[in-house]
Amino acid sequence: MTIDHLDNFWTLDNPTHFDALALKTFQFQYENNSIYRAFCDLINCNPVDVVSTENIPHLPISFFKSKRVCCFDDPNASFFSSSTTSGGQASKHFYQNLDDYRMSFRKGFEYFFGAIEDYTVLALLPSYLEREGSSLIYMADDMIRNSQHEESGFYLNGWEELKDQLNALERQGRKTLLLGVSFGLLDFVERYTFELKNTIVMETGGMKGRRKELTREALHQQLSEGFGCSKIHSEYGMTELLSQAYSKGDGLFECPPWMRVAARENQDPFQKLPWGQSGGLNITDLANRNTCAFIATEDLGIIHSDSQFEVLGRFDTSEIRGCNLMVV
């Protein structure tokens, strides 16, 4: 089997199609991803026995730090890398091209919020702009370019300009997306306050030692008061994934049709948990078809349905990384 035999993930429209593509993706990655195959063999997973998505093993996310987790042999392949704490080891997500990533975040945003062309996109992502290899910066840059509004752009330290732009767009009644790292948004509303009615304020997480970490509820309360909006949206993504889940302000993240989340027992990682119980989050991201679509994250959460989940925090042993997590 080659990657060309896998159906386009962005055309999925029901759970049966998801399950079928997930099983085909597993077979393809078992055959072509030596790291994933070695992991499956180590835990005595025979691919012949994998007849349901419940049987598919999820690779510990830490493998992305020490191994080349991919289905191709290209020593010169490019990669996205995660931010790290001091002395930490970065995760690397290798890719041959970015077609699947672009399709995933474009279709994913449209699925939840409509066409990006309807928005002016303002990005406040200082810590990410200061380094190379960020998948979040790539996504934000693509959104800015495709919004086709001349006011769209990145803001590193130009807070006065960003304040004026937000107020001007608000006066014009323009739909606006303000995408920001958590500490940047907090710093911003400590200096300025707003009454935003036409703007989606979306935090991407990422306190990472810049400020004292907050619960999501405390963070959103401060941001909601500062921006004068009733709800703060959230984006959940990470270097190891090509897809994103979104929350529209109620603390529940929702997945696009090609992404699914399940919970596992903390002390027994191969034991799946029913909905409503907290555990480690296993993510199936079918956009990851050329690396590994089945990832056991270091995040703790509760599953409310196949497509909805809540993030509680992270395992004590996991590093603080550039993904959207708050401590409890």
Image (spheres, rainbow, N blue to C red):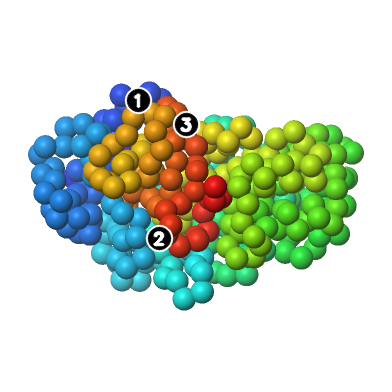
Evaluate whether residue 289 shows in this view.
no
The residue shown at (54%, 34%) is 252
Q: Is residue 155 above or below residue 148?
A: below
The residue shown at (35%, 71%) is 76
Query: For this view, does 126 lie left or right of residue 25?
Result: right
Between disc 1 and disc 3, the foreground one is 3
Which amino acid type is shown beneath numbered disc 2? Answer: Thr
SS of the residue under disc 2: loop
Q: Is residue 226 above or below residue 18?
A: below
Residue nearest the observer in this picture, 300 or 203? 300
* Residue 179 picture location, percent across and down: 67, 49
Query: For this view, does 268 lie left or right of residue 239?
Result: left
Write down the residue under mark 3: 308
Q: Is residue 117 above or below residue 186?
A: above
Query: For this view, does 213 lie left or right of residue 99?
Result: right
Alpha carbon separation for disc pair 1 and 3 = 14 Å
* Residue 214 picture location, percent across and down: 63, 52
SS of the residue under disc 1: helix
Number of numbered discs overlaid on the protein picture:
3
Q: Is residue 98 above or below residue 148?
A: below
The residue shown at (30%, 64%) is 68
Mark 3 nearby-residue class (10 Å; few <14, some 14–19, many ≥20) = some
Write down the residue under mark 1: 15
Mark 1 nearby-residue class (10 Å; few <14, some 14–19, many ≥20) = few
Write down the residue under mark 2: 317
Which of the image's four quarters has the N terminus? top left
Alpha carbon separation for disc pair 2 and 1 = 34 Å
